[in-house]
Amino acid sequence: MEPLMQNTKIAAVVVTFNRLEKLKKVLSSLEAQTRLPDQLVIVNNAATDGTDSFLKEYAANFKYSDSVQLDIVTLEKNEGGAGGFSAGMRRAYEIGCDYAWIFDDDGYPEPDALDKLFKGYGDAVAELGPDVPFACSLVKFIDGTISEMNNPIPTWDWGRLKAKGLDIVLVSRCSFVSVLIPRWVMEAFGLPYKEYFIWFDDAEYTLRITRACPGVQVLDSVVLHDMGVNRGVNFGMINEKNVWKFLYGARNEASYHLHHEGLYPYLRFCAMVRNNMRQGNVDKKLQRQVYGKLLEARSFNPQIDFPQTPISKSAH
């Protein structure tokens, strides 16, 4: 296939909150890309660690090639990863970008990550048709092993393109650590639910946009995830320090199952959470907090926000 898209405009969208030193590594990784993004959108999620001052200096001394434009979006309050990605993708859409390449502030793309991701997406479209909704990278931990938190969910026929000699597999959902999302997807399916704040926003969004066609993982596009400890999560790991995240997780995922799949999937999820917490001997007080969020999910049902619809002043 001819390059999709030699004249396409790609925005790299980075969401950051109080990870200044890691953000600097991300930006250095972007500057080293063999295929530079055309636009760099940095979403400052109301960071309090000096990120604002750093970004002002960064903008004043911005040293990419003349073809790369910088756009800094500063949110009035911390909107979480979900709100940050929603704002960043909206901005990429507003400035006319054809693709948003989104990732967190602790993901370091290898120098050819965007080049290979973009090419892989084009190869997938050539084989599967124009409905391919996203392409994600292979995410590794900083020691080179697989990142336990960022394994996409494969489709039943995951090896369809692999069988044709492409280093690409079919997936139904993935995390927001290096995902290339076309403009038409944002127009047709909207943006991630900013109300989720954190947890399951990436899963819900990629499930939403794969209804007609699966997404793809491009295995030779690699990003390192500097997440501290390389392990997955389950509700048996709840403690006083991390319970705030799990509360969002319980509410968000329960809401998804109830309002988008039905009562039985919701009840099955609630049972799984209960079993996880019991097996992990989670403190009873913390268990009660989680049960409260599972119940809250019944009335928590965000509506899709489309980028072509202006934000109403009452929404913030």
Image (cartoon, rainbow, N blue to C red):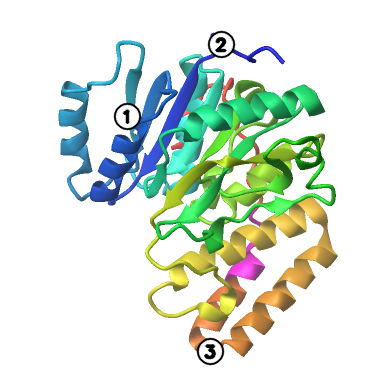
In the structure shown, which secondary structural element does the residue marked by tag 3 occupy? helix
Q: Mark 2: which amino acid? A: Gln
Visible residue check, residue 130: no
Task: Give yes or no for residue 44 being in the magenta stretch.
Answer: no
Left/right of residue 26 with respect to residue 84 in the rendered view? left
Q: Whole-Å distance between the Cαs marked 2 and 1? A: 20 Å
Q: Which residues are magenta?
A: 293-300
Left or right relative to 233: residue 111: left
CA distance for labels 1 and 3:
48 Å
Q: Which mark is residue 31?
A: 1
* 237 shown above or below 130: below
From the image, which quarter does the N terminus lie in?
top right
Among the two numbered marks 2 and 1 on one chain, the one whose residue lies closer to the N terminus: 2
Q: Which residue is mark 2?
A: 6
Residue on which disc 3 sits: 284
Q: Residue 309 appears in which quarter of the rendering? A: top right
Quadrant of the snapshot with the C terminus: top left
Residue found at x 41% / y 68%: 229
Is residue 180 shown to the viewer in this render?
yes
Q: Amino acid at mark 1?
A: Glu
Label 1, residues with CA under 10 Å away: few <14, some 14-19, many ≥20: some
